[in-house]
Image (cartoon, helix red, strand yellow):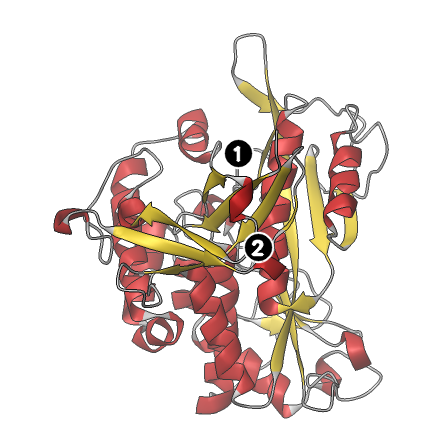
């Protein structure tokens, strides 16, 4: 067949939605979707969420893309593209997560700074047993930093790497994580929108390639109750107008070498810590991961090269100076999550929030921080709704839709435990 186009966007639930389109669409183009996708929940319940227009006739929205954004796919005779959403009058759709990230980038560019982003993804590999029940992938020789067939007997990660190369993704690393069969996938730093475009396509590609091997590769935060959680660590820095790293105070990094920009970003992330969680850890399952002493970004704190704080300061300086925010998981829409982190950091700089002292505890037996995220999704959504400054920065209409959908999710999941909780999410995240 002729090469076709797979046009996609990442929705409010972090689900990839799209259409296969004919060869004639390979160029600058557009296609229409029902706007009420933004009122659809994981269980296909159609809800009258703010902005979804479910009760106003379920009108169209339009996905528009550019020829230069079309790229090769991991499937034969197929190209893929991501675009931006517009309403039926041709105006940018306020619910579009990719638009929210572009606004965050533009807000930083007003300061003469361009955000650079690198994202670390963690995922568990599951496979069905003889009864069809999902179980952890059988990799008994898997260890933290494991590579090779003991960590991945089917070698599906080799295929993921090969496909990433074919698509032009710049992989920094694939390795086994602490809790076998858990894996980490890291792409290199890039401009914020391109970095997140790459992440959402890489994540989809990895899940679809793994499925060919009988593996359900899930990026949900806590699919295996007795194992650790999976995060989506957001690393960021800024290019200044001269092309230098604006977070760098010299050749060395770490807390002793923080400049004013880094301090302002840290202060913003701490100030908006509780509200952020409602956007970047947005499922009931997220709060099984977000626990004290779990290296998960639970605490409202910061530190140096310390994996038990929420915002970690790299010990690398110069071009590699960066901040790493560790609360998010990949049940969040990556565009929304990165936008929220960048906006919280910007608010810290612009509003000159005070920066609390560095965390001195080990994070297991002793912690200076006394505040963490909410204990559950209900509390996190309430915290987000109260943080009107952050909501306005990210996008008030997007956040209102999110709050509505997540309050419904609280009710949908309140009686779910164990496999039932996992199976509510696992095929979508």
Name the residue carrying label 2. 296
**Residue at 51% across, 47% down:** 25
x and y, in percent, of residue 403 in the image: 29, 57
Which residue does the image show at 53% across and 45% down from the upper left? Answer: 24
Task: Indicate left or right for 238 with 225 as reference.
Answer: right
Task: Identify which residue is drawn at 31% across, 41% down.
Answer: 41
Q: Can you tell which quarter of the image residue 148 is in?
A: top right
Q: Quadrant of residue 23?
A: top right
Q: Tell me the quarter of the picture where residue 149 sits.
A: top right
- Sequence-first disc among 1 and 2: 1
In the foreground, 46 or 167 = 167
Crowding around mark 2 (Cα neighbors within 10 Å: few <14, some 14 to 19, many 20+) is many
In this rendering, the count of numbered labels is 2
Instruction: For mark 2, give the secondary structure.
Output: loop
* 213 relative to 22, above or below: above
Q: Position of residue 407 (x, y in %)?
A: 26, 50
Q: Which mark is residue 139?
A: none
User: Which quarter of the rendering shows the N terminus?
Assistant: top right
Toward the viewer: 102 or 283?
Answer: 102
Q: Which residue is mark 1?
A: 225
Judge left or right: residue 138 versus residue 334.
right
Residue at the far top: name it.
Answer: 130
Q: Between 178 and 46, which is closer to the camera in this rendering?
A: 46
Tags 1 and 2 touching, CB below 8 Å: no
- Tell me if I can see residue 377 in this picture: yes
Disc 1 element: loop
* Relative image position of residue 236 (x, y in whole percent): 64, 71
Toward the front, the furthest residue is 24
Residue 345 location in percent, x, y? Answer: 52, 78
Using the image as rendered, state which of residue 175 and residue 399 is in the foreground. 399
């Amino acid at each position: 067949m002729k090469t076709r186009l797979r046009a996609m966007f990442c929705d409010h639930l972090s689900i990839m939605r799209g259409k296969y389109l004919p060869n004639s669409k390979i160029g600058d183009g557009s296609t229409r979707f029902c706007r009420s996708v933004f009122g659809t929940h994981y269980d296909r319940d159609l809800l009258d969420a703010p902005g979804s227009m479910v009760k106003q006739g379920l009108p169209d929205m339009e996905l528009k893309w550019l020829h230069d954004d079309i790229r090769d796919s991991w499937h034969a005779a197929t190209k893929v593209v991501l675009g931006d959403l517009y309403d039926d009058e041709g105006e940018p759709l306020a619910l579009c997560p990719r638009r929210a990230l572009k606004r965050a980038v533009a807000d930083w560019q007003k300061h003469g700074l361009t955000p650079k982003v690198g994202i670390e993804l963690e995922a568990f590999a599951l496979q069905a047993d003889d009864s069809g029940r999902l179980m952890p992938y059988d990799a008994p020789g898997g260890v933290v930093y494991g590579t090779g067939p003991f960590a991945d007997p089917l070698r599906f990660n080799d295929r993921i790497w090969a496909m990433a190369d074919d698509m032009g993704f710049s992989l920094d690393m694939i390795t086994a994580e602490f809790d076998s069969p858990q894996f980490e996938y890291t792409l290199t730093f890039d401009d914020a929108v391109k970095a997140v475009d790459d992440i959402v396509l890489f994540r989809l590609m990895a899940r679809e390639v793994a499925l060919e091997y009988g593996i359900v590769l899930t990026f949900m935060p806590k699919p295996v109750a007795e194992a650790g959680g999976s995060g989506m660590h957001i690393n960021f820095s800024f290019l200044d107008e001269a092309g230098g790293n604006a977070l760098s105070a010299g050749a060395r990094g770490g807390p002793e070498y923080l400049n004013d920009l880094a301090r302002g970003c840290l202060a913003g992330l701490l100030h908006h810590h509780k509200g952020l969680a409602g956007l970047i850890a947005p499922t009931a399952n997220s709060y099984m991961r977000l626990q004290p002493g779990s290296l998960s970004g639970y605490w409202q704190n910061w530190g140096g090269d310390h994996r038990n704080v929420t915002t970690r300061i790299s010990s690398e300086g110069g071009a590699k100076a960066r901040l790493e925010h560790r609360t998010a998981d990949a049940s969040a829409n990556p565009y929304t999550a990165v936008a929220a982190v960048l906006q919280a950091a910007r608010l810290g700089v612009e509003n000159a929030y005070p920066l609390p002292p560095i965390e001195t505890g080990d994070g297991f037996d002793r912690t200076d921080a006394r505040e963490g995220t909410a204990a559950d999704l209900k509390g996190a959504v309430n915290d987000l709704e109260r943080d009107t400054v952050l909501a306005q920065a990210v996008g008030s209409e997007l956040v209102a839709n999110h709050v509505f959908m997540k309050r419904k999710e609280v009710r949908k999941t309140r009686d779910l435990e164990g496999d039932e909780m996992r199976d509510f999410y696992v095929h979508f995240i």
